[in-house]
Amino acid sequence: GGGAAAAAVASKSGEEKMLQLAELVYLLVYLCTIWNTFTSFRVCEAVPLQSERNTTGILQSWPCWEKEEFSIIRKCTSCSDYEKKVKVECAFTGFVEEIQCTSDHKYRSCRSDEMEELKFWRFEGIVVLVGVIFAIIVLFRQRALDRRAEQKVRRQLESI
């Protein structure tokens, strides 16, 4: 009789260790997913405006479009691979617009509406994914806690 009870207790502690190991694996998978999401999609990246800094990082004088009249010659368009290497303005956002000031012809970095919308929906997708992952983790955790409570009640009933 006593040996069977000891074996049952030993197997239950083995089950609890397996549950703890499974919970740890779920947590690691979750953390890796979050890390990979934020590093691969670059959700949190901030891009400095061209008017704030030049290539050396030193504050520059006001650009012509901030101190005089200007007109946009070419709307915000994506830079080619060559332009990204040649034009400093392309390096910041990957998009550039051509403007004509009264005294000068310049290019300035800009943000594409399509790219901003894509980033927004990418972020929304990440939020939904994180929500689903949390829901699954909560589901498994609740099941594990229910099993523990059931085992505890069963042990209490057996001891009566």
Image (cartoon, helix red, strand yellow):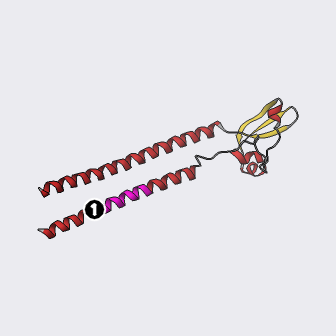
Asked where in the image residue 47 lies, by quadrant, the reply is top right
In this rendered view, identify the residue nearer to me: 123 or 138: 138
Location of residue 23 in the rendering, given as x and y in whole percent from the top left corner: 37, 56
Location of residue 109 in the rendering, given as x and y in whole percent from the top left corner: 73, 41
Name the residue at 64% across, 36% down.
113
Q: Which residue is mark 1?
A: 15
Magenta-drawn segment = 13-28
In this rendered view, identify the residue nearer to me: 158 or 139: 158
| Residue type marked 1 | Glu
Predominant secondary structure, magenta span: helix
Name the residue at 57% across, 53% down.
39
Q: Quadrant of the C terminus?
A: bottom left
User: SS at mark 1?
Assistant: helix
- Looking at the image, residue 8 sits to the left or right of residue 160; the answer is right
In this rendered view, identify the residue nearer to me: 59 or 126: 59
In the image, residue 125 lies in the stretch drawn in magenta: no
Q: How many marks?
A: 1
- Looking at the image, residue 157 sits to the left or right of residue 104; the answer is left
In this rendered view, identify the residue nearer to me: 89 or 82: 89
- How many neighbours does mark 1 have within 10 angstroms: few (below 14), some (14-19), or many (20 or more)? few
In the displayed orientation, state which residue is furthest to the front.
160
- Looking at the image, residue 120 sits to the left or right of residue 98; the answer is left
Location of residue 110 in the rendering, given as x and y in whole percent from the top left corner: 71, 39
In the displayed orientation, state which residue is furthest to the right.
103
Whether residue 152 is situated above or below residue 130 in the rendered picture:
below
Name the residue at 29% across, 60% down.
16
Name the residue at 62% across, 47% down.
45
Whether residue 95 is situated above or below residue 69 in the rendered picture:
below
Location of residue 136 in the rendering, given as x and y in whole percent from the top left corner: 37, 48
Asked where in the image residue 26 lies, by quadrant, the reply is bottom left
Q: Quadrant of the N terminus?
A: bottom left
In the image, residue 27 lies in the stretch drawn in magenta: yes
